[in-house]
Amino acid sequence: MPQSRMIDAPPPSTTSHVVFSIAGDRLALPVGAVRRFLPLPRLDRLPTAPAPVEGIFVYHGTVVPVLRLAAILGLPVRDVGLYAPLLLVERAEGRAEGRAEGMLALLAGRVHGVVPVAPEDLLPADPALSFNGCAVGAFRDALGTVAVLSPGRLLTETETSLLDAFRAAEERRLSGWSATTP
């Protein structure tokens, strides 16, 4: 006689987050915003760039600024190690418009991995990390509380415009060095 099986209800919808640390603080970004993890490449420094801009590099033909998220969030800024990972992030406006210039890279101390988080496990944002409202929530794991950041809120509109101007200037400079046949 065949046994009947109970069908379990589907699990509640979860969202996955990339968990990383900066200056001892554990932070997370939605996995959909993180395009890739990269090793730290050689960075070109921009002498007139503001302190949070560590430098720039070219990724598949696109100039990508590297930001010190610690400086943006008011966390202690530490020296960048040779093996510091980068999180290649797509800003929401760039992704929505399909533009490559929506990319930026965030320096991290360490990437811990991808964690699924159920909606009921999300907590209110920590006001101490709410510069520009970029901390949109938090969740707890075995090591403590992880602040969830919104990539679209990491920079103000003015900062975004200035960063785009730095990127455009560097793209113009690099285009002058393009190989052409005389």
Image (cartoon, grey):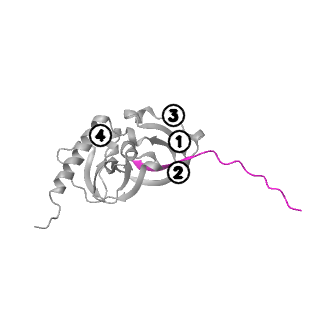
Give the residue drawn at x 52%, y 48%. 143
Marker count (numbered): 4
Span shown in magenta? 1-22
Q: Name the residue under label 3.
A: 124
Asked if the residue at tag 2 contacts the one at tag 1, i.e. Cβ–Cβ closer than 8 Å, the answer is yes
Is-magenta flag for residue 12?
Answer: yes
**Sooner in the amino-acid sequence: mark 1 or mark 2:** 2
Q: Which of marks 3 and 4 is in front?
A: 4
**Sooner in the amino-acid sequence: mark 2 or mark 4:** 2
Tell me the SS state at disc 1. strand
Between 146 and 133, the one lying in front of the other is 133
Circle number at residue 139: 1
Horizontal and vertical percent for residue 95? 39, 47
Q: How far apart are marks 3 and 2 (CA)?
A: 18 Å
Horizontal and vertical percent for residue 29? 45, 46
Tell me the SS state at disc 4. helix
Name the kind of residue labelled 4 in the image: Thr
Q: Name the residue under label 4.
A: 160
Q: Distance between the residues labelled 3 and 1?
A: 9 Å
Q: Nearer the viewer, mark 2 or mark 4?
A: 4
Tell me the SS state at disc 3. loop
Name the kind of residue labelled 3 in the image: Pro
Seen in the image, is 99 located left or right of residue 13?
left
* Disc 2: CA contacts within 10 A as few (<14), some (14-19) or many (>=20): some
